[in-house]
Every structure is written in structure tokens, then in C-alpha cells.
Amino acid sequence: MNAREMDRQTLMAMPKERLVDLMFMHIRNMWAVDGLYFLGIEERFGTEGATEIDRNVWEIMGKIEARRLRETMGIKENDISAMMRALSASSWALDLEERKIEVGEERAVVKNTNCRVQKTRLDKGLEEFPCREVRWDYLKTFAREFNDNIVVECSICPPGDHEDDLWCEWIIKMTK
């Protein structure tokens, strides 16, 4: 038996609730690594340089993650509903603490009402992270993996103004 098969057996033997907890722990760890890398790059190259690097990474990650989720979840459709099923299981959306997602046939809206990343920065005495371009590029490439006619619009996201209970809002719709 190879290592991957042994790992699968270990995971399959875990109680379902513990397996879900493990998955969320790994998502939080991924976000911690992302944040620590960003802070290190920001310290060395400034916020603008760190944001540009982060934007490039997440743009590529949107494409990779969409492809992997489609395959893993067996999603064959290419409409907004299919894209949103995958996005809801993505590392970006799955552990958003207080999100609101509305999905229709031709339009979806994703809102982050309590951004842990931004609040952590503010608690550390840092400025808000200008995440609009980073998240936008991730979402655009994620959507493109499903259908070139799915467009993503940003209505609210730092560095723009926002309410305390709405950090970002993304509109996802079909163009044709």
C-alpha cells in the first residue's frame, strides 16, 4: 500500500465530524500562511508590492481551484448555479464566517459581512488590506473556468468605503 492509500484509509476511519473539523483547520492554516507571507512581503516591499504579488498568486489560484473543484465535485454544467456550487466549497468562501450568498439562474451575489482578515489587520494596528483587485482577479478567473460569459462585478471592497457589517459584495452574472 502506498502513502496516499494509507492517508485515505486514515481519513476514512475518522468520524465525519472530526474530518470536517480537520478540513476547516487546514483552510484556516492556508489563510494563516497566506497572511504571514503577505505581511513578510509587505514589510520588505510595501503594501503595493505585496498586493501585486498577492493578486498574481490568487489570479492563478482561481483557475486552479475552479478546475479542481469541478473535477472533485463532478460538476459538468457551466452556468452560474454550477459555478456557485463550486465557489461555495472553495478555500475563499468555505470558511467566510458570516457570508451571505444569493443564487439565481442569471445572477448571484456574495457578501462578506465580517472579514476576519481585515479585522485581524486592524487589531494589529495595520491599515485595511486593499483586497479588491486580489479577490476580483481570483473570482474572475474562477468564473472563466466555468463559462466565458460569466462576469464578476465588485460593488463594495476595500480600499473602497464599506459599512462595518459589509466588507465586500460581489455580483456574478451572465453577459449573454
Image (cartoon, rainbow, N blue to C red):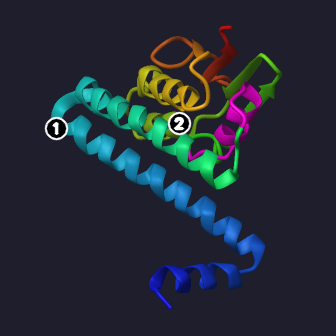
Mark 2: amino acid: Lys
Q: Position of residue 128 (x, y in %)?
A: 43, 26
Q: Confirm whether residue 123 shows in the render.
A: no
Q: Residue furthest top?
A: 176
Q: Quadrant of the C terminus?
A: top right
Which numbered circle lies on residue 44? 1
Q: Position of residue 89 (x, y in %)?
A: 67, 47
Of the numbered discs 2 and 1, the one sitting upstream in the chain is: 1
Mark 1: amino acid: Arg
Q: Residue at x 72, y 26 (%)?
A: 80
Magenta part of the chain? 77-91
Q: Position of residue 62 (x, y in %)?
A: 48, 36
Q: Secondary structure at mark 2?
A: helix
Q: Residue at x 70, y 44 (%)?
A: 75
* In the displayed structure image, the side of residue 63 where residue 105 appears, left or right: right
Between 14 and 79, which is closer to the camera in this rendering?
79
Q: Is residue 78 magenta?
A: yes
Q: Position of residue 152 (x, y in %)?
A: 59, 17
Disc 2 and disc 1: Cα gap in Å?
22 Å
**Rendering quarter of residue 100:** top right
Vertical side of 114 occupied by 65: above or below: below
Q: Residue at x 41, y 36 (%)?
A: 58
Residue that label 2 marks? 119
